[in-house]
Amino acid sequence: MSRLPVIVGFGGINPAGRVSSNHAYRRMVIDRLSPREAADTYQSLTTLMNLETDPADAATRSYIDTHTLIRRIESHDVTQVPIQRIASLKTESDVHDFILNRRHLPESLPSSWTVTDLADGEVRVRVSGNLDVLFPDTRVARVSSAGQVPTGFDPGAIYASRNHPRGLQLTVFGASDALRSSGIPISTLKAHVRPDQFAVYSGSAMAQLDEDGYGGLLRNHMVGKRPTSKNTPLGLPEMPGDFINAYVLGSVGGTAGIIGACATFLYNVKQAMEEIRSGSKRIALVGNAEAPILPEVIEGYRVMGALAEDEALQALDGTTTTDHRRACRPFSTNCGFTVAESAVYALIMDDELAVELGANILCSVGDVFVNADGFKKSIPGPGIGNYITVAKAMASARAILGSKGLREGTYMQAHGTGTPQNRVTESAILNQLAGTFGVSNWLTGAIKAYVGHSMAPAGGDQLSAILGAWKHGWVPGITTIDHIADDVFHDNLHLPMDHVEIDPQQMQGAFINSKGFGGNNATGLFLSPFATRKMLERKWGSAAMREHAARNEAVARASSDYDAQMLKETVPPIYQFGEGVLSGEDLQIDEHRIRLPGFELAVELSQDSPYPDMQIDD
């Protein structure tokens, strides 16, 4: 029997707020929500941002609106970005004479230096010729917009973070949020599957680049500091997955951090989908975390010509003031993308287990396709691979939902970075293939307009908007734009500048498109909860689904209770440092299985060859 990967939990944090219970999505369409739903989301953000004011107060709501989504960078002073300037000092006598503490002397003295001891540990240094120095300086950043998590939310302050890089702090919160949002305890998950049938696929595209990760490793020696013992291991790009295994789940199952630049989230979803389809895994926690709002990273992308610079934004608007909120303008006249931070995770399990546990059915993974670009003129430039991924995903939707289902019951969440190149190339792909498959006026969103481009988790941000639309009936419009650029192809596309109301039962499928640096293209098809339930009822029967619904009452109540608790206080994430550590002596091993404490089922040791047609006799 076929196995359908069902998403039963979803959570994390991005510039719009907490992802679970659709709060981040709700922030994007908050002007279309009912008063009760809007109030809950303002309450969620008030708690998350550690505000002590009334979330119903107009001033509080105005503050929240201003300090979420894309906005002026707050994590560092963009008017005083530290730099070093190289200089060569000269004197009329061609000799430099100065005094300093002996411990400040270089270990390898330049040949032009003469050192004489003085009292109190000081020395006199005489330098013949020019003296090369670095002067501390600052500069004003040319990019001052970013998608930052809500002001006041500090992921490292709500658990014992111990100098963890920010990306790993976001990981711990995001993974915990997704797991708790499912309403199913981790102990229950461990009781129903073998230890090796639980997988974690997670990582970061950029690695951890702040001072507690690779930033400290590469920078400290050059600024008079020493790297720490944590810089190298905690900087590794797959470390988000390692942290989840070691400190959140205690998992001994499959693990990987599959990296595909801006398509990384879908790469990891594809791995989970294939493992669940094959039956080798039954549960997978999938997601990514990224914290790239650093002066060095922003400058690196800026010199590529990839980011929306302040002067360019001002020129677009004909003003001398930067409109930070509208820095990202997908498919309109624009000038670059906007860096963002985020951590988004999905708990995925096979349909049989979802039905058995009464799990929440948020959606299911229909298909994910990945293709490279072939030969390229420029490594970050676009190529042909995305034509293949989009076409294959649309063909898969046609096969699952039927031609009418594809044409009338799907929409696209585009990569939509807000760069001049993306608006042309991605619109050309989507427009042509919509025509090829007979789709007219294809609804196409681009939520980077709200939250920016978070690199690895970007596809997760897009999925959060899809799940929210299926729950609340509004597809977020591209509200940062007031026109479609002349060079955008949209004969067959609907690129809305305002929110679009949909019927969640009619919109049965949605696509996520990702175009990554280096030719990393991925397109995913996700099936609505309505379509997923229809598929499950066809497979398992109406009686089984009624039993699922009965079991789901307790699960849904647990999910709701978690959300209610998070509305009141930010619950510390799951973080079990040094707890439940096992050694070989704790295992029960024989030639058929391995039993582990904390897991009800054993790891089964295969008795069959994977190559039966090439069997070598004993």
Image (cartoon, rainbow, N blue to C red):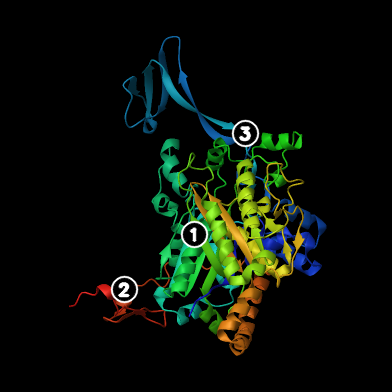
- The x and y percentages for residue 110 are 33, 24
Q: Which residue is mark 1?
A: 267
Q: Nearer the viewer, residue 486 or 145?
A: 486
Q: Answer yes or no: is residue 493 visible.
A: yes
- Three-letter residue code for mark 1: Tyr
User: Residue at the location (60% across, 88% down)?
Assistant: 547
Q: Which residue is mark 2?
A: 610
- Three-letter residue code for mark 2: Pro
**Dot 3 or dot 1, earlier in sequence:** 3
Question: Helix, strand, or loop for circle 3?
Answer: loop
- Three-letter residue code for mark 3: Val
Q: Nearer the viewer, residue 337 or 615?
A: 615
The 10 Å Cα crowd at callout 2, few under 14, some 14 to 19, many 20 or more, is few
Gap in Å between the C-alphas at discs 2 and 1? 26 Å
**Dot 2 or dot 1, earlier in sequence:** 1
Q: Which residue is mark 3?
A: 140
Question: Helix, strand, or loop for circle 2?
Answer: loop
Q: Would you say the residues marked 3 and 2 are in contact, meaning their CB atoms lie under 8 Å apart?
A: no
